[in-house]
Image (tube, rainbow, N blue to C red):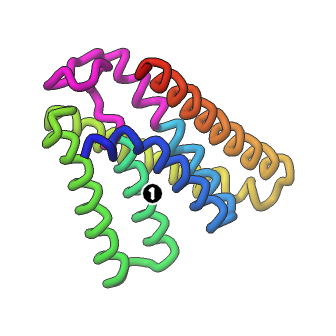
Amino acid sequence: MMMLFTQSKWIVTVLFGVFIIWRHDAEALWFAGGSILNAMFSMSLKHILNQKRPSSLKSDPGMPSSHAQSIFFTVIFIILSSIKLLTINELTITSSSLALAFGSYFSYLRVSQKLHTVSQVIVGAVIGSICSILWYCLWNALMLDAFVSSLWVRIIVVLGSAGIWLCFLIHVICQWLKDKRNET
C-alpha cells in the first residue's frame, strides 16, 4: 500500500492531464487549476498548524490531511458538476453516494496506515469540500459568463490554468528528483 502513496503524485498528474484532454473545456481547466491551488493551500496549512502525525513514517506535519483535502475537493466538484448537468435524479444520487463512499474510504486509508489521525483526515475532508464548493460557485457565478463573453477572460483562464498545472508538474518532477537523490 505504501507504494501507492509514494506514486500518488504521479497518478494525480497523469489523471489531470487525461481529464483535461478528455473534457477539453474551460470547466476542466478551472477544476484542475483549483485542485492544484487547493493542494498548495493544504501544504501551507500543514506548515502553519504544524501538528505531528501519529507515527514517524513521514516527517512533515499532518494537519490537515492533504490527501483527504484533495480527494474531497475532487469528489464535491464532481458531485456539483453532475447535479448541474443531469439535475438531481437516481443516477446523480447513486453516483454521488458512491463518490462520497470511495472518497471516504481512500481518506480513511491514511488513518489505517497511521499516516494521519482521524481528526486530521476529517479536517482535510471538510476544508477540501469547502474549497471545492467555493471554487465551483466562483466558476458558475462569476467566471463562466465572463469566459463566454470575453476573449481576454478565456485567455487568462486558459493560460492561468495551464500555468498552474505546469508549475505543479515541475514541482512533482523536482520532488521526484530530490527523493531519488536522497535514496542514493
In the rendered structure, the answer to whether residue 130 lies left or right of residue 100 reads: right
| Region in magenta | 39-68
Farthest-out residue, front: 184
Point out residue 132 in the picture as x, y percentages from the top left corner: 44, 48
Q: Residues within 10 Å of mark 1 (few under 14, many from 20)?
A: many
Does residue 32 lie above or below 122 as drawn?
A: below
| Residue shown at the point (30%, 38%) measured from the top left | 124
| Residue shown at the point (19%, 20%) measured from the top left | 56
Does residue 23 lie above or below 183 as drawn?
A: below
Q: Amino acid at mark 1?
A: Phe
Point out residue 170 in the picture as x, y percentages from the top left corner: 63, 32
The quadrant holding residue 89 is: bottom left
Does residue 102 lie above or below 54 as drawn?
A: below
> Residue 159: in sight, yes or no?
yes
Q: Nearer the viewer, residue 30 or 15?
A: 15
Q: Nearer the viewer, residue 178 or 87?
A: 178
Q: Is residue 58 magenta?
A: yes
In the rendered structure, the answer to whether residue 54 lies left or right of residue 25 reads: left
Farthest-out residue, bottom: 90
Does residue 43 lie above or below 17 as drawn?
A: above
Point out residue 140 in the picture as x, y percentages from the top left corner: 58, 57
Can you say which quadrant of the picture contains the C terminus? top left
Q: Helix, strand, or loop for circle 1?
A: helix
Say which residue label 1 marks. Answer: 77
> Residue 130: in sight, yes or no?
no
Farthest-out residue, right: 151
Q: Number of marks in the image?
A: 1
Q: Is residue 170 magenta?
A: no
| Residue shown at the point (33%, 46%) measured from the top left | 4
